[in-house]
Amino acid sequence: MQKWAMFSLFIIACLLGAGVLFQNISARQAEMAKEETAGPSIKFVATNYQFDKPEYTAKAGEKMTVSLMNKEGLHALEIVGTNVKLDNNTKSMDVTFDKPGTYEVHCVLPCGPGHADMKTKIVVS
Ligand SMILES: [Cu+2]
């Protein structure tokens, strides 16, 4: 009788595990589908202590998605002159650059010795 109970528990645990796994997979697929259908975007990939590009480009008046990926270390950023602030809680936002120009982007989370130099820019034309 006890063996049966153990066996049943084991089966239930397996089913739960598979359920969680499946849910994760479909959530990820939905996220990927969303990314594919999205319009223009900029993805800032942050490492210690720089962003993956010295300069990003965008078009004025066009709604776009900006996102942050912390590949190494923990960083947050703001785009000066906009309301965009990204960190590990808010990983992406939509933004429209109204005017052409150069927008400074910098890390706003004290992340280590290279923090002060952790800057990049977006050239909007
Ligand atoms: Cu920093």
Image (spheres, rainbow, N blue to C red):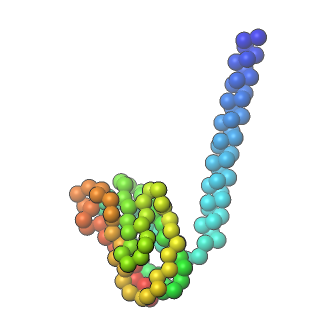
Residue 46, x across and y down, in percent: 39, 62
Q: What residue is at 70 percent from the left and 18 percent from the top?
A: 6
Residue 39, x across and y down, in percent: 59, 76
Is residue 34 visible to us here? yes
Residue 20, x across and y down, in percent: 65, 42
The single residue placed furthest to the top in the displayed view is 1
**On screen, 75 above or below 37?**
above
The single residue placed furthest to the front in the displayed view is 83
Is residue 50 visible to us here? no
Q: Is residue 26 left or right of residue 57?
A: right
In which quarter of the view is residue 2 placed? top right
For the N terminus, which image quadrant?
top right
Q: What residue is at 44 percent from the left and 80 percent from the top?
A: 57
In which quarter of the view is residue 11 placed? top right
**On screen, 60 above or below 7?**
below
For the C terminus, which image quadrant?
bottom left
Residue 16, x across and y down, in percent: 68, 35
Q: Ligand 1 falls in which quarter? A: bottom left
Q: What residue is at 76 percent from the left and 16 percent from the top?
A: 4
Q: Is residue 24 left or right of residue 124?
A: right
**On screen, 70 above or below 59?**
above
**On screen, 72 above or below 5?**
below
Q: What residue is at 27 percent from the left and 61 percent from the top?
A: 115
Q: How many numbered discs sit on the rendered protein?
A: 0
